[in-house]
Image (spheres, rainbow, N blue to C red):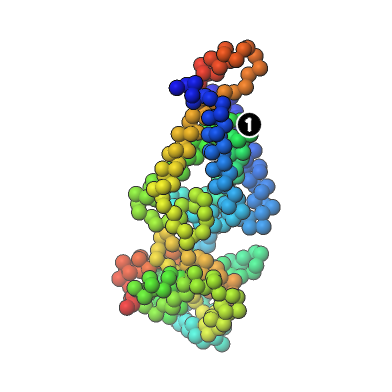
Amino acid sequence: MRKIFIEILLILIFTLIIALLGNSFNSKGIKLSSSQSRISVEDEAAYKDEFRNDPYDTLSVQMPLLNDLRQKDKKEGFYIPQNITLSLAKKLYDKNALFIDARKKIDFDAGHIKGAINISYDDFLAKTKEERIEMMRKYNKNGIIIAYCEGGTCDVSIDVAYELARMGFNYVNLYRPGYIAWKNAGYPVEP
Amino acid sequence: MRHILSNRILQIILRLIVGGTFIYASLGKIADPVSFAKAINNYQMLPEFTVNFLAIFIPYLEFITGTFLIIGLFKKGSSLIIIVSLILFTIGLLQAYIRGLSINCGCFSLDPSTKSEILIRIIQDIFLLLFTFIILLYSKTKKIVLNNKESENVNQQRI
């Protein structure tokens, strides 16, 4: 019995070493601790009250944040999309933020956050880089963008958000509670 | 029964099945830890700060224990680790199934568009679990001392 535990200990230590080495040599390797930036309810004060977002005003360079909480990706230099809460999503909605629905068109047509545009994850990632840039040209690079999908378990919004951030959009947010939480809260939806 | 289960050929076949499955399952995850981290996160079981560490550690653990099982090194230890991880995977799958989470399990494919059949994975896990128990309980560890029959008895007593 004791021998088995020694074996297990040896295997675990061996695996830990190999895993850490393997991850550091892997070009797709990840950081050990996941530190997704989150804006809590308290931080919402950081947003200027008088600010009003215009997603279509491509000349605007107005900074919507008072305290800049964003983090830059160290390798690629884009601003990492931030997770936001339902209440902050609503506040930004009131300030005319651009909501992006990353679900399939059929889900989008069945119901979405009022005023949201549909950028389906599948279609979007299937496009070439040039097509994506062309598609997003009419939007303000410094405007507040909020990507969402169904809610909870869905992750297509993450992929769309990161892709937009890589394309040079500076204020991309991720609203993970998604459409379900929004609808349940009784906030504006359409149709 | 004991004779059949400790049969050398059967043992090798079982080790190949379980070890092979684990190695096969690990490769995609080792290559793409980001997607696997997302898959773990989707289970909504674990605090977020543990997710990345597990996304790095679990695939290598699968790969190494699978390899050990096949080459016959640390057989008992590897099979016990595999049993524990299979039980944990099954619990994860079960709770996802019961809560009705519609997720890709992250078992083999990491493509989020493949919605895998959770129930099939659970059944598969249970079979693997059974195989691994047979390996753990009935595989012979090599002993140079004594003649064959006696060493077999010694091993069975130890278990």
Residue at (37, 50) in percent of width and height:
B97
Q: Which is nearer the eye, B2 or A38?
A: B2
Q: Which SS class for mark 1?
A: loop
Q: Is residue A140 visible?
A: no
Q: Is residue A62 above or below residue A76?
A: below
For label 1, the residue is B73
Expressed as whole percent of the image width and height from the top left, the position of residue A23 reads 64, 51
Q: Is residue B60 above or below residue B114?
A: above
Going by the numbered disc 1, the residue's amino acid type is: Leu
Check disc 1: other Cα within 10 Å, few if <14, some if 14-19, many if 20+.
some
Identify the image quadrant of residue A170. bottom right
Quadrant including the N terminus of chain B: top left
Q: Is residue A106 above or below residue B77?
A: below
Q: Is residue A81 above or below residue B134?
A: below
Expressed as whole percent of the image width and height from the top left, the position of residue B7 reads 53, 25
Q: Which is nearer the eye, B120 or A129?
A: B120
Residue at (44, 76) in percent of width and height:
A118
Residue at (46, 49) in percent of width and height:
B46
Identify the image quadrant of residue B102. bottom left
Identify the image quadrant of residue A104. bottom left
Expressed as whole percent of the image width and height from the top left, the position of residue B83 reads 49, 35
Q: Total marks drawn? A: 1
Expressed as whole percent of the image width and height from the top left, the position of residue B62 reads 57, 42
Chain letter of the residue beneath label 1 in the structure image:
B
Residue at (51, 59) in percent of width and height:
B111
